[in-house]
Amino acid sequence: MLSKSTRKTKVVWSYSAAQLRPEFASHAVEVEADVVRLVFEKKNLPEISVFLNQLNEVSKSGSYRPPVMLDLSPTSRAYLTDVGNSREISFGETLVLSSETAVGSLKVTSDYWDELFKEGESAFLDYGNIQLKILSVEKSKSVYKVTSTVELGGTITSDMPVHVPSTRAISHSAQRLNQLAPDEMKQMASQGIDYLVVSGAVGHEYMRELKRVFHEVSGREPWLLLKIDSKLIVEKLPEFLDDIHGVYVSRRDLALTTDAALVPMITKEIIQLCNEHAKIIVTASEILGSMRKNPTPTRAEVSDIANAVIDGTDAVVLAEEIPLGPYTGRALDVVDKVIKDVEQSSAVHRNWGKADPKIKIEMDAVAYGAFHTARRVGAKAIVCLTELGNTALKLSSFRPPIDVIAVTFDESTRRKMALVRGVDGMLLNKNLNIEQVLDVINHGLLENSWLKEGDLIVFVSVTLSSVSRTDSNLFTVQRLVRA
């Protein structure tokens, strides 16, 4: 049953693979999470597989099956270990990092010591809460020792991630980290992955290989989202637009390679670029992170959500492990309320509109015409027939004030719509005769949505005609009537 959308911006739940439990799948189904994001690490592939099996099993009973986003972007290449009790380090203090436990130094565990640190570069602990300047890198036999000075102090603890953005951008390990082997690709494809988040460091060929293997196994390609996690990837984004369906902006990572004060403006520019090219834009990084332990969010966290919605993001990503904490319900209520308040407020100026959209292909003209016609005739919804979701993406990119219903013959495409702003999916029987499509959609909307007899809709069909045997690009105004 399609219910009238009261919140157009979608919300993504996040789980780290290390903390996945099969029972979390039942909870995600029960609360009808928009999208479930799994943070992949090779060592936790079994946990991910068990979770996906459970998710698919629960949904066999006819329950809602949330789409799944698998985040393959590189995690940290190094961690502080054996720190013992947490302790404070201060500005100007000298800090020694070592590959082995030694008196007077902190042990860093990493498989990539040979390329991790570089003299003169900055290192960050816990995504920038602590900043170090690397003074020297020494190697004696198989033991590495790095001497650094503290430029931004704070509290250090065991398992704190260590980042050196300048070496990650060019290292071979960053490209290898979290890449799926062919057998792993096939396994994930068979278990129903809808979106893959990939790093720009892996390159175009690997992205194409992912699409090829997934299509070979499941008959459908996942939607690829490019992880924006460095200044270098921001600059290269236009080169990737043909290979991806959208981007995933990790502002936490981005702030490590650029002035943190510029991150909000860079994010706005990326959102505008994605809207112009009908690409999905997902905004992430510690959204409501304090609610892992606290019942109320900070003012900054609430503003963070509001600004992302105002700028026109498709979805916001809750901080990892919020679904595992004691305040899951409260966090969902907060993000839901903030999004609705912004979207429904007449006093808020939103950065959504396309003042002068570029018309490059027929789909652009049809979608833009449908969007304006829907506003002028007071249509209750825009209904589009879509095979792979491209028509729905184009319509959503105009950020229409009314709902878009994407009608498709493919269950995989219907699930993917859960990430697109203001779009809901509706499944049609694959065996329908083309001449029957419009009548069946009319009946389905009256029986399975909030729409009522007499409501106006704008119906959009690009390349597949619902009124003739030949292909066509068209939109029509329809009034719903009972047969």
Image (tube, grey):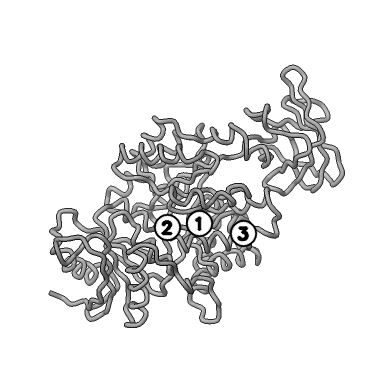
Q: Earlier in the sequence, mark 3 or mark 2?
A: 3
* Nearer-the-camera pick, 373 or 255: 373
Q: Residue 103 location, x and y as percent?
A: 82, 27
- Regarding mark 1 in the picture, which secondary structure is present there? strand
In the picture of the structure, the residue carrying the numbered disc 1 is 282
Q: Earlier in the sequence, mark 2 or mark 1?
A: 1
What quarter of the picture does the C terminus occupy? bottom left
Q: Residue at x 29, y 59 (%)?
A: 386
Q: Give the labeled residue for mark 2.
A: 419
Distance Cα–Cα, label 3 vs label 2:
22 Å
Q: Residues within 10 Å of mark 3 (few under 14, many from 20)?
A: some
**Crowd band around label 1 with a 10 angstrom C-alpha radius: few (<14), some (14–19), many (20+):** many
Left or right of 277, for residue 364 = left
Look at 68% across and 45% down and name the residue there: 126
Asked which secondary structure carries label 3, the reply is: helix
Say which residue label 3 marks.
Answer: 266
Query: In the figure, 160 relative to 388: above or below?
Result: above
> Amino acid type of disc 2?
Leu
Mark 1, mark 3: which one is toward the viewer? 3
Residue 357, image x, y percentages: 44, 69
- The answer to whether the residue labelled 2 contacts the one labelled 1, judged by CB atoms less than 8 Å apart, is yes
CB within 8 Å, label 1 to label 3: no
Residue 240: x and y in percent read 49, 48
Tally of numbered tags = 3
| Nearer to me, 381 or 276 | 276
Q: Tag 2: Cα neighbours inside 10 Å, few (<14), some, or many (≥20)?
A: many
Q: Earlier in the sequence, mark 1 or mark 3?
A: 3
- From mark 1 to mark 3, how far is it between C-alphas? 14 Å
Q: Quadrant of residue 456?
A: bottom left
Q: Give the quadrant of the N terminus.
A: bottom left
Q: Amino acid at mark 1?
A: Val
